[in-house]
Amino acid sequence: MGGAALELQDLANSPEWGDALVRAHREVFGSEVDADWFRWKYAQGVGAGLFRDGELAAFCGGVPRPLWWRGQRLKGLQITDVMVREPWRQVGRRGGAFARVSAALYGRQLGTVSAASDLGGRQALAHGAPFDVGYGFPSHRHLKLAEMLGLLRDGGPVMAAVWTDTARPVMDQVLGNGAQGPDPWLAEELDPAGALGAAQRGWSLMGNDLRDAVVGERGWEALHWRYLAQPRGAALGPVRFLGLRRPWHPWPSGVVVVRDDLHKTMWLDWIGPPAMLRLAWAHALRCSLDGGASEMHGWFSARPWAMLAHTSPAGSGEVARLGIPVAGRFSERDLEGASWWMMAGDTDFL
């Protein structure tokens, strides 16, 4: 079971590779993913795996995700499905399976930091890698190990929150503020086609207001892949779209994305003006509670969480960290002052 016995391979979109990844994923994460999930998630994805006798011992994957920062469209890589099967978990050893697959993926897909990168108008020197910057959502323990190995930087906390009926007073206050004047905001269920069109408009309003944040592209293509094209067997529950619009306007200004799971709702995303986030939260919570859900859950990076922290959640706490690979186009100094706008729908825990 030593490292020398393991063969490093790049992800190949073949049935054999898919079968091995599905078996490992089910074992490590207790999931029920299948071949359709593999084709959906990794048709355009990348990955590095350590094999022994046809079995996948460890894997680190990624899927392309366009990011925007300071008016630039970046080639982002979302890190996904980092796993090591039990016999090969050599935690803390520099030559361990985790270190090998992570370093292999980052080196091949993100390259090395370019000392000449500059967002002040000059183009960064090409660093010879397919992607500019990566991000993922490791646990605190995972991040500490990756930092010790020189693989990841800490991009800040990801907070989990849950709201119940106890948040109604704040919800009613926010809705009341939004209803002032002759044209209160309306919330309405959208079909998938309507949601995709509304999301495209919402994203155009959102992007300019988040120029100082690193934010994942949220147009129709991203939503279609993440929510509508996902295989039914891999989905964790039906996704619904809630549009917010003025009564006199035919088109929503933004879209809330939620997922229903028995008696709770999971907030996945808001695609619209950031200043409307609290109003979108209030409408989503009211629809959830009035629809029979007892709880609404959500995950948020520091930037959006700061706007929702004082909404009387029944519970909140850190659930993950943002992990930013050291490899990539930007140095730590380049990224100083950058805030990340991420929510549950930005993760790959779908």
Image (cartoon, grey):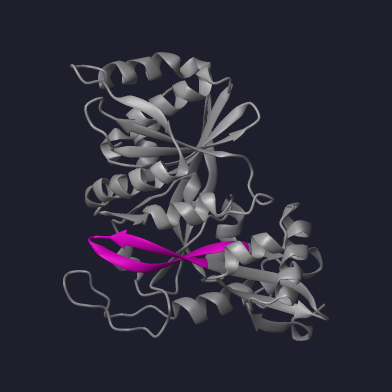
Residue 76 coordinates in the image, percent (x, y): 41, 66
Task: Please state the extent of the stretch shown in magenta in the rendering.
Answer: 63-81
- What quarter of the picture does the N terminus occupy? bottom right
Residue at screen point 74% across, 52% down: 32
Residue under the image location 36 percent in, 56 percent down: 217
State whether residue 206 is above or below residue 275.
below
Instruction: Check if residue 318 falls in the magenta segment.
Output: no
Is 12 situated above or below 311? Answer: below
Is residue 74 within the magenta segment? Answer: yes
Q: Is residue 310 visible?
A: no
Residue 249 as seen in the image, left or right of residue 92: left
Toward which corner of the image does residue 127 lie, by quadrant? bottom left
Above-or-below relation of 200 to 131:
above
Q: Main secondary structure of the magenta part?
A: strand
**Residue 3: image x %, image y %?**
74, 81
Residue at 76%, 52% in the rendered image: 30
Q: Position of residue 322 (x, y in %)?
A: 47, 54
